[in-house]
Amino acid sequence: MDLKQKYIQLLESFNDSVSKESDSLLGQYRKVGIQGLKTNGLPTSSDEQWLYTNLEPIFEYDWNAKTKGMDEKVNLDEVFSCDVPNLDTHVVLLINGHYFKQNNTSDLPSEVLMGGLADFSSTHSDIIKKYLFKAADVNQKMNALNATLAQDGLFLFIPKNVQLEKPIQIINIAYGNEEYFVNQHNLIVVEEGSKAQIAFCDHTLNPTKFFVNQLTEVHLEANAHLEFYNVQNSNADTVQVSSICVNQHRDSNFLSNIVSLHGGTIRNELRVKLLESGASCDVSGVNLTDRKQHVDSHTQIDHLAPHCDSNQLYKGIYDDEGTGAFTGRIVVHPGAQKTTAFQSNKNMLLTSNAKVNTRPQLEIYADDVKCSHGATTGQLDQKAMFYLRARGIEKNEARMLMMYAFANEIVSKIKIEPLAIRIEGLINRRLRGELSRCANCVIQCG
């Protein structure tokens, strides 16, 4: 039996086991996802979009796709203890793709809706129906799997003219003593004139194999502002496919920053559609890869309206036999005049065995634009090394300082100051080969 047929049977069996949910809005997309798999199949190395990340050996593994989440009671304070000084946030927990029902959201403004996507698809079906799978294409291969297997995720709705004073911190945990295929669908809606900051932290709670397929849809209405920070720090046996799909309307602003500290195989997809005039996005990311870890960043920014701005800056540091890839695509559609779009990918290879593939792409179908794209890959600057050594700095320390300076350009974009300071510290320790988790966090990520 080939992989495609194996997963068709898995998905059909899964769909039958949760058929009682078929009337929910999430359930209505299960058959659509199965049909998408039948039509398009699974990602393969011969697929242009998956040229540098081979998931076939991962799909061959017999993953357990559970029909239920965590039943046992978990104390959030016992599971996670954040050690970021002075970071005051609204904290919520998701376990294996399910919203943790013991979360306390009473400190949020009363008009803000936050909870499990499955529950809100029943209680607020009008909102969910308006936005679900409107930013993400359900027929894309990993999205089709997510549509079929995801039973829950985070739902966040910030109504018109609400500006949250504190960031929302989402602790996203993969947990269990058996191999688990986690599918999670998050839906974030920021209405007109509203503003929010989100810190999304991905962790694994045990050294078990996990396959995490995470889809996040973001909708920004007119003049909405969202900062989305994602810190990925999972064990070396974790495979994570994280897709963020964003729809932006007039004068909205989206800032995204992804820091991949640790993991096995990571694929980060970001797709942004600038739908109306005045929309802007600033997206960035940095990954620190060693041993045989792999990080693949894949972006697409669609300029569909005039007077929109986009900026992309992605960096990677590759040590040992670490590998990576960057595919960044900007499309300036017909009529999108006065577009400003910039893209840059910079990579540092620390050993002869480290490898990275980079493909910056730019398509322009308008004639009044300012656009650029490019990529650089190199090693540590030996002249700079000599400069530091000549001033009495030990070789390993000089090497670390140069790597830290290289990564810090991304960290400097984080506007939550306590979070930025803490991530600086984590990157510092990561580059030194020290423990790859927060000092006081009880989650064993390494």
Image: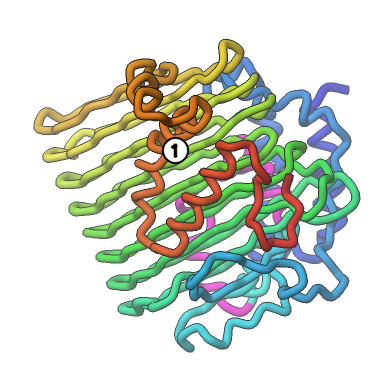
Q: Is residue 324 left or right of residue 308?
A: right
Furthest-top residue in view? Answer: 352
For the residue pair 384 and 145, the one nearer the viewer reads as 384
State which quadrant residue 38 falls in. Answer: top right
For the residue pair 345 and 303, the one nearer the viewer reads as 345
Q: Position of residue 152 (x, y in %)?
A: 68, 62
For the residue pair 393 and 162, the one nearer the viewer reads as 393
Give the vertical position of 4 relative to 84 (above or below).
Answer: above
Please give the name of the residue rendered at 69% of the width and 24% of the height, measured from the top-left corner.
292
Please give the name of the residue rendered at 48% of the width and 46% of the height, measured from the top-left corner.
258
Q: Quadrant of the C terminus?
A: top right
State which quadrant residue 441 falls in. Answer: bottom right
Q: How many marks?
A: 1
Q: Amino acid at mark 1?
A: Tyr
Give yes or no for residue 149 being in the magenta stretch. yes
Furthest-front residue in view? Answer: 392
What secondary structure is the magenta-colored segment mainly? Answer: helix
In the rendered image, which residue does mark 1 sit on?
404
Please give the name of the residue rendered at 38% of the width and 37% of the height, measured from the top-left corner.
405
Please give the name of the residue rendered at 41% of the width and 16% of the height, measured from the top-left corner.
378
Q: Look at the image and tell me whether residue 152 can be seen.
A: no
Q: Is residue 337 left or right of residue 195?
A: left
Give yes or no for residue 274 being in the magenta stretch. no
Secondary element type, mark 1: helix
Mark 1 nearby-residue class (10 Å; few <14, some 14–19, many ≥20):
many
Q: Position of residue 232 (x, y in %)?
A: 59, 47
Give the vertical position of 423 relative to 441 (above or below).
Answer: above
Q: Position of residue 185 (x, y in %)?
A: 62, 56
